[in-house]
Image (tube, rainbow, N blue to C red):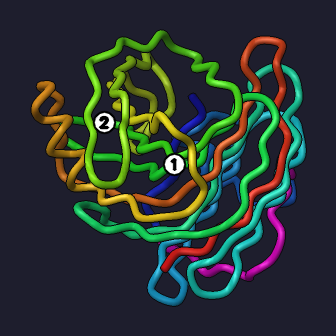
Amino acid sequence: MLSSFILAAIALIPGVFTAPSEALPQLGDRLHGETSNAIQARQGGYFWSSWSEGGGTFRCNNGAGGSYSVTWQSSGGSSGFVCGKGWSPGGNKAVTYSGDYTPKGPSYLAVYGWTRNPLIEYYIMDAHGDLLPNEPWTEKGNFTIDEGTYTVYTSTRVNKPSIIGTATFQQYWSVRTEQRVGGTITTGKHFDQWSKFGLQLGGHDYMILATEGYTSGSTTSNGTSSVTLG
């Protein structure tokens, strides 16, 4: 999976972020490698984060309020992006959103976040393109709540980028059985279900309603996404 950003608030000029671009400040180099770009900011009560690496074109637009849009085309090799809006810190929230999401190839639309101690990267996925994770998934079970039915998976990333630098860490996944674009995701309900499977979280870092697209093997990704929180 492509992942993570620097936990820092910076001044942001709203507009288009296209990667890679050596003219942009390489805020993600220390955490994400020499070819990555990361931007984070707080705007209108929301936390905005945009990260990319490798070749391809990733145009993440930070809109007004809780809105954002993205058009992307990944290329070969390690190529992809994650961008979205949410909160820092994250935690137990009712995340209500609407929008449009049209992916082709490996891609996710999900609540995406991190915890520390333990270091966990997590996804609560409402919709997706091709499910082609870069690490093997282990199914833990499924559950049904008023918001839908989800299957829970775990995976492990070894010596990969994270919010604390290169590290080995677990990923937790809730993948919705019937895809949707729009509705409410109550994150605490997922955290509670994960706990029943023995999956523990740490202290919450940021959490966003994210769009992600990436290259897996020889399969590239492209598409458009437009999301509004609230």
Out of 200 and 19, give the one closest to the viewer: 200
Please state which amino acid type lies under the numbered disc 1: Ala
- Position of residue 197 in the picture relative to residue 226 (left or right): left
Amino acid type at mark 2: Ile
Q: Position of residue 158 (x, y in %)?
A: 43, 15
Magenta region? 9-21
Label 1 residue SS: strand
On screen, 10 above or below 186? below
Q: CA distance from mark 2 to mark 1?
A: 15 Å
* Closest to the observer, 79 or 145: 145
Identify the residue shown where x is 50% and y is 32%: 161
Please state, as top left, top right, bottom left or bottom right, where the N terminus lies in the image: top right
Please identify the dominant SS of the magenta region. loop
Res 152 seen here = yes
In this view, the residue in front, 34 or 222, is 222
Name which quarter of the figure residue 74 lies in: top right
Quadrant of the image occupied by residue 80: top right
Instruction: Identify the residue position indicated by label 1 in the image.
Output: 110
Residue at point 27% right, 39% down? 144
| Residue 78 image position (x, y, % from top left) | 74, 25
Disc on the earlier residue, 2 or 1: 1
Q: Which mark is residue 120?
A: 2
Residues at badges 2 and 1 in contact (C-beta under 8 Å)?
no
Residue 130 lies in quadrant? top right
Return the mark for residue 71.
none
Q: Residue at x 59, y 69 (%)?
A: 98
Q: Position of residue 209 (x, y in %)?
A: 51, 59
Residue at (56% x, 79% y) in the render: 66
Query: Which dot, 2 or 1, sits closer to the camera?
Result: 1
Residue 69's place in the image compared with 142, above or below, is below
Residue 132 in magenta? Answer: no
216 sits to left or right of 177: right
